Amino acid sequence: MNAFPRLVIAGTASGVGKTTATVAILAALRERGRLVQPFKAGPDFIDPSHHQAATGRPSRNLDGWILGERLNRETFTRAAADADLSVIEGMMGLFDSSSPLTDIGSTAELAKQLDAPVILVIDGSAMARSAAAMVAGYACFDPAVCVAGVLFNRVSSEGHYKLLKAAVEQETDVVAVGYLCPDAEVTITDRHLGLTMAHEQRNRSLYHRLAKAALNTVDLDRLESLANSCARLPPASARIMSCRPNPVRIGVAQDQAFCFYYADNLELLEAAGGELVAFSPLHDAKLPDDLGMLYLGGGYPELHGLALASNRPMKSAIKRFGEQGGTIYAECGGMMYLTQGMRDFDGRLHEMVGLFPAEATMQRTGMTLGYRSIEVAQSCVIGPAGLTARGHEFHYSTILPKGPLTYVCTSTDAQGASKGADGMVANKTLGLYTHLHFASQPSCAKALVDSAGCSTT
């Protein structure tokens, strides 16, 4: 049994600043010389990019609905094995979940599964004694969730913080662990899918400034003490690695347009015998040599339509790869790139790869968001008919057919309601709107690698 020191940073609601607080704490602990392993509750690619920038380590996603308790614990303990402590950023409000009446998929559920103390982030900008009432409510709502500390965000002065601290500590059993001041210089800007990614930050001192803020006004000694108070957890079993004699080279699209990948998906492809090779559909003129598979993740192709359309050599190479039988796995933005054209928010049409006879159209309203369970209806590159896997959808685009489209999967939401067809297919190219988490069905990664063969590019 190992200690695995750990904390959950949760919010009272979305928008209170839990990502800012989490990244500040991660960066401050790193500056203290700690090896910190970050995690994110729920299906999210954006916040983990900031975690990695702050710690230098890939952030892992944990989710009660997608993975369940056993896989959450295995993912956590495997990634945290060599860390001094782990910090898990929650999603939405502490008790918000896929249902208004259960905690399935919530931060609270994850805190219980990991037996981890919770630090509650509250926007303290316009309250005093009311903070005690709020903390008391969150601490008592589910006695199995240990709300151990509270961190106040957007507090302008030490005097204001002292009022909040006195109210909470005199009237509840929860300790105040500090505060963060409002600071425009450490604001992470947002857009249509949430915050901007870490690699897009123009303020390169962002993480240092956040670390300095936490070092000045957050009791990091108390946080480390709470993390070290956790009960021990059994270590994860070793991941079984492939015995494939010759690894399959997998081209992974990685640039400003394609940047949504679960760290576990990439590692499971490696465990199945893949050798990951990064390339850029935006900037490269050709594919890497000797590829057996392409992985086109989601991201922001809609913000780079002109550049993607202008890179004709890359589009031609990918189309040729697919038409000659190479395995291509594409999710959301990657699938949009494989259509005949993509229409951006301003209605401009940009020519894309053309493997799917369809047009992807961006819309400013009507976001599609939610958990998804997909079932393979017709054998394809991720597995045989009947196979199921879990993930989520998160997009503002729609697909307009320009010819006959073949779908090989069906999709349902967290309540089991049908969400229609998913998984466009052409030869050995599969395009899904759903971002699958391969750990929910590890055979998907193996099936993809097994399906991959050498193609002429």
Image: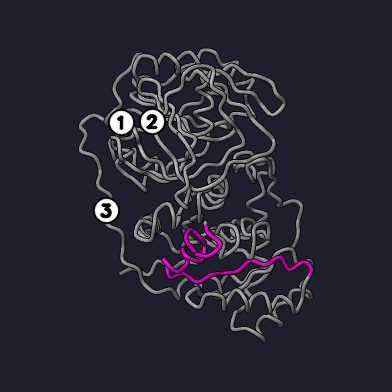
Where does the image place residue 85, in percent across and percent down from the top left?
A: 46, 64
Sooner in the amino-acid sequence: mark 3 or mark 2: 3
Figure quadrant of the C terminus: top left
The span shown in magenta is 99-126
Q: Which mark is residue 379?
A: 1
The residue drawn where x is 79% and y is 68% is: 126
Within the magenta stretch, is there residue 111? yes
Where does the image place residue 276, in percent across and percent down from the top left?
A: 38, 33
Judged by depth in the image, the label closer to the viewer, 3 or 2, is: 2
Per the image, the residue denoted by label 2 is: 408
Per the image, the residue denoted by label 3 is: 238
Q: Amino acid at mark 2?
A: Val
The front one of 448 and 356 is: 356
Within the magenta stretch, is there residue 307? no
Q: Amino acid at mark 3?
A: Ala
Q: CA distance from mark 3 to mark 2?
A: 33 Å
- Considering every residue shown, the one lying at the far front of the view is 417
Q: Which mark is residue 250?
A: none
Is residue 243 found left or right of 124 in the rendered image? left
Label 3 crowd bin: few (<14), some (14–19), many (20+), radius 10 Å: few
Sooner in the amino-acid sequence: mark 2 or mark 1: 1
The front one of 393 and 77 is: 393
Which secondary structure, mark 2? Answer: strand
Please report contact status of discs 2 and 1: CB closer than 8 Å, yes or no: yes
